Amino acid sequence: MCIRDSVLTVDSNGEAGFAAASGGGGGGDGDYVHISTADITSATATVEVTLPTGYDRFEFMFDFYSSGQAYVYLQFSEDDGSNYLLNAYRVYGQNNSYGSSLTWTNTTYNGPVMVDRTKYLTGSIKIFRASETSDTRFISFSSGFDGGAYTASIQSASGMSTAQTARINKVKFLASVGRTFDSGKIVLYGIKDS
């Protein structure tokens, strides 16, 4: 990840973040503000994370271990997780293969981030237009090792809900039916424009 005109910082809690470099510049990708960290210490199929107001862009950084070789899916909610949006545009790719749909509807597998099952799952997800009531989008870049179809894979994905009518205020990371994240971490940053 390249952050123009920024420096890596570590706060008193040991959390990494980005801040504007002194001495000018500006206009870059904005300042990264640490919002939350979710530690996974026992097997779970889902992790929900609340998106606070005041940001138009977010970035998640995740690192999971899944003995059952999980997938990673990302779902959007506009009602604090009571319901998750089903209709979406999506595109994903891994190791020179890809899939896409402009009319995707699936209650379980909406928002593919990693479509090849793997034990070691690492990546980042950026969310754009998070303060808007329509067209909130995401893009992800990730890698997996000891996978179901590949020994190692580089994967990317993008998506957008076509059913959104309010601000997205919660997202869910989903391992897929019958699989879990056994351990790991999800760190959420808000991106402030300077």
Image: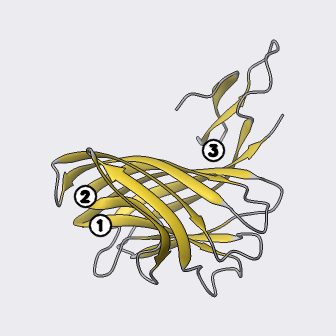
Task: Residue 43: name its quadrant.
Answer: bottom left
Amino acid under disc 3? Asn
Residue denoted by label 3: 13
Query: Residue at coordinates 40% horizontally, 55% vertically from top-left?
Result: 92
Query: Residue at coordinates 58% horizontally, 81% vertically from top-left?
Result: 84
Task: Residue 160: name its quadrant.
Answer: bottom right
Farthest residue in the bottom direction? 82
State how far apart marks 3 and 2 are (Cα).
31 Å
In the picture, measured across the screen, residue 147 lies left or right of residue 41, that is: left
Task: Look at discs 3 and 2 and give the one toward the viewer.
Answer: 2
* Image quadrant in which the C terminus is located: top right
Marks 2 & 1, CB-CB < 8 Å contact = yes
- Disc 3 or 1, which lies upstream in sequence? 3
Amino acid under disc 1? Ala
State how far apart marks 3 and 1 are (Cα).
30 Å
Residue denoted by label 1: 70
Image coordinates of residue 60 in percent, x first then y, are 56, 52
In the picture, measured across the screen, residue 88 lies left or right of residue 170, that is: left
Query: Residue at coordinates 48% horizontally, 63% vertically from top-left?
Result: 90
Q: Residue 118 carries which label?
A: 2
Front residue of 146 and 150: 150
Query: Residue at coordinates 62% horizontally, 58% vertically from top-left?
Result: 137
SS at mark 3 in the image: loop
State how far apart marks 2 and 1 are (Cα).
6 Å
Please say if 15 is above or below 6: below
Task: Residue 37: name its quadrant.
Answer: bottom right
